[in-house]
Amino acid sequence: MKVERRVISVIVQNEHSVLARITGLFAARGYNIEALTVAPIPDSNMSRLTIETKGNVRVIEQIIKQLHKLIPTFKVIEHEEMVEKEMVLMKFPINESLANIQALCEAYNGGIVNVSSQHIITMIADEPKRVKHFIEAAQRFHPVEIVRGGVVAMERE
């Protein structure tokens, strides 16, 4: 069976141990979480977890069934048509070309967010494939640190 990348959102009660229970569910069954983003939903007592994972159709179906069984789970959304973004921060040595780094960042929905006497820090927010391409393209500027955020996604309805 074909292994595919999938993004699943889970709306849960915002209470202690929920994250541990969800990650434990994945670990107990040998499923890997590629990326995980968690944040409270404004004006509610709920949180939204966005999970990026890989698996064949059967594995994904099993993950979704197991997520539905967790007590604090309110809703599980398997994204089909979605808007998806990921953020990355990158630190470059100050001796690299500020103008060229800025131009590269702008091509990927980003820019320079901080400049110190030693480093330039950039941020981009784009589709995960484009984030990967940005990281590859930025290697020519000798990044000293790269921090990727997890995927966030929303249905396109």
Image (spheres, rainbow, N blue to C red):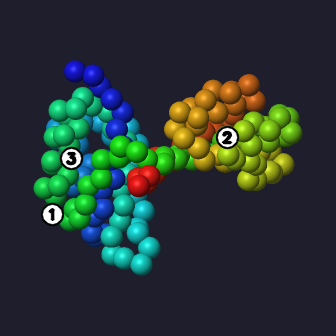
Q: Which residue is mark 1?
A: 71
Quadrant of residue 140 within the rendered picture: top right
* Residue drawn at x 69%, y 47% as measured from the top left: 110
* Residue drawn at x 73%, y 53% as measured from the top left: 113
The type of residue carrying mark 3 is Ile
Q: Which residue is mark 2?
A: 108
| Image coords of residue 65 (percent x, y) | 15, 48
Name the residue nearer the viewer: 136 or 10. Answer: 10
> Counting residues from the N terminus, which is met first, the one under dot 2 or under dot 3?
3
Mark closer to the observer (1, 2) = 2
| Image coords of residue 25 (percent x, y) | 19, 47
Q: Judging from the image, what secondary structure is the residue with disc 2 in? A: loop
| Image coords of residue 147 (percent x, y) | 57, 43
Q: Which residue is mark 3?
A: 64
- Gap between marks 2 and 3 measured at Cα: 32 Å
Quadrant holding the N terminus: top left
